[in-house]
Amino acid sequence: MDMQLIFIKTQNFINFKMSMQVCCVDPQPQIFPPSDVEKMKAELVKIDNFMKEVKVGKATPETFQGLEAAVEVINEIILSLDNSNDFFKIGGFNVLMPLLSCPDKEVVATTAELIADLCQNNTYCQTKALECNLLPELVKLLDSPLDSKVCSKALYAVSCLCRNNENSIKHLETTNIIPILMKILQESDEKLRAKTAFFLSYLSNYDSFREAFYKADMVGTLIKLLEKEQDSSSEHLLASLRDQVFKHVQSRVQCASKEYNLKEILLNKKNLYDSKSEFEEAKEHCDKLLALCFPEEASNAS
């Protein structure tokens, strides 16, 4: 009986000791995935290394592909508002101007898109972009002999930087944006022309731009474009003209001038749109323009 008791006590002691050893073993360290900030920092290091190759004239096609890929990775991360702000805080905005000056158009276009997404509905990043003097550089890209993709992405960036930001609009007024936009309207493809007209509509919300558009004969330019064959940009051109004349009396008077033949253009477009539901908004623009510029004919036109 005593031997059995000793055995039980011994076994209990061994079990206790083993349990203590198990409890005291260090757990395996938990490995967390890198944070978004760490990911952005890693891509910025890549960009810095690639840009060194560009600076010393040793860039290869792989260099530009690497730059484009790094910018695209960052763009995916910054779609969160907090990440956009953190991108500035870790020094990310310092690479934007050099990237916009990169000799590779794909890198430039991708960078302009990154700036657009950083600034879209983000007052903090809009302010920082202005402080970094990015707006004049983006306007220059609109006037540069690059391809339509660069122009389109630069226009997107300018639009996002200025959207709902009075300070950005004031900065934009100091650039030569108006003749550049008129040039794009007249020389670009219909897709880019539509985007430009859409931006003109937004700028027409501001007194200073409405007056500047009038002095630059933006009304005449829009009417001449509307006189051409119907395409996907026509609805946006109509909207832009409508927004310009809505709060600008001189523009309405100009539209009513017989030399532009606007009334006939609008009536012809209404007939074209009449049986097509997809042009309902365009038809509404025509009706509004007729009512604003030719009030005596509005009832007959409808």
Image (cartoon, grey):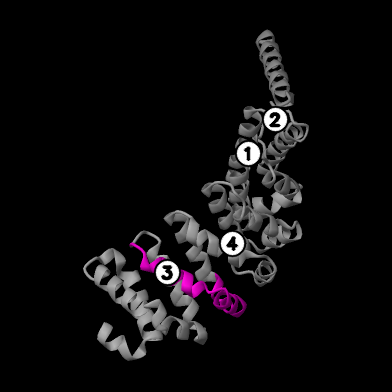
**Mark carried by residue 59:** 2
* Amino acid at the residue labelled 1: Asp
3 up-or-down from 144: above or below: above
* Badge 3 or badge 1: first in the primary sequence: 1
- Which is the main secondary structure of the residues drawn in magenta? helix
Left or right of 183 on screen, residue 174: right
Q: CA distance from mark 2 to mark 4?
A: 32 Å
Residue 115 in the magenta stretch? The answer is no
Query: Which is in the foreground here, disc 3 or disc 1?
Result: 3
Q: Which residue is mark 1?
A: 104
Q: CA distance from mark 4 to mark 1?
A: 22 Å
CB-based contact (under 8 Å), mark 2 and mark 3? no
* Badge 4 or badge 1: first in the primary sequence: 1
Q: Which residue is mark 3?
A: 224
Q: CA distance from mark 3 to mark 1?
A: 35 Å
Q: CA distance from mark 4 to mark 3?
A: 17 Å
The magenta region covers: 203-229
Q: Position of residue 225 (x, y in %)?
A: 42, 66
**Mark carried by residue 162:** none
CB-based contact (under 8 Å), mark 1 and mark 2? yes
* Amino acid at the residue labelled 3: Lys
Report crowding for label 1: few under 14, some 14 to 19, many 20 or more residues within 10 A (C-alpha): some
Q: Which residue is mark 4?
A: 180
* Badge 1 or badge 2: first in the primary sequence: 2
Tell me the residue at 73%/36% (across/down). 51
Indicate the secondary structure of the residue bearing disc 2.
loop
Left or right of 48 on screen, residue 70: left
Report crowding for label 3: few under 14, some 14 to 19, many 20 or more residues within 10 A (C-alpha): some
- The outermost residue toward the left is 275
Image quarter where the N terminus lies is top right
Image quarter where the C terminus lies is bottom left
Q: In this view of the protein, which residue sits in the foreground, 27 or 294?
A: 294
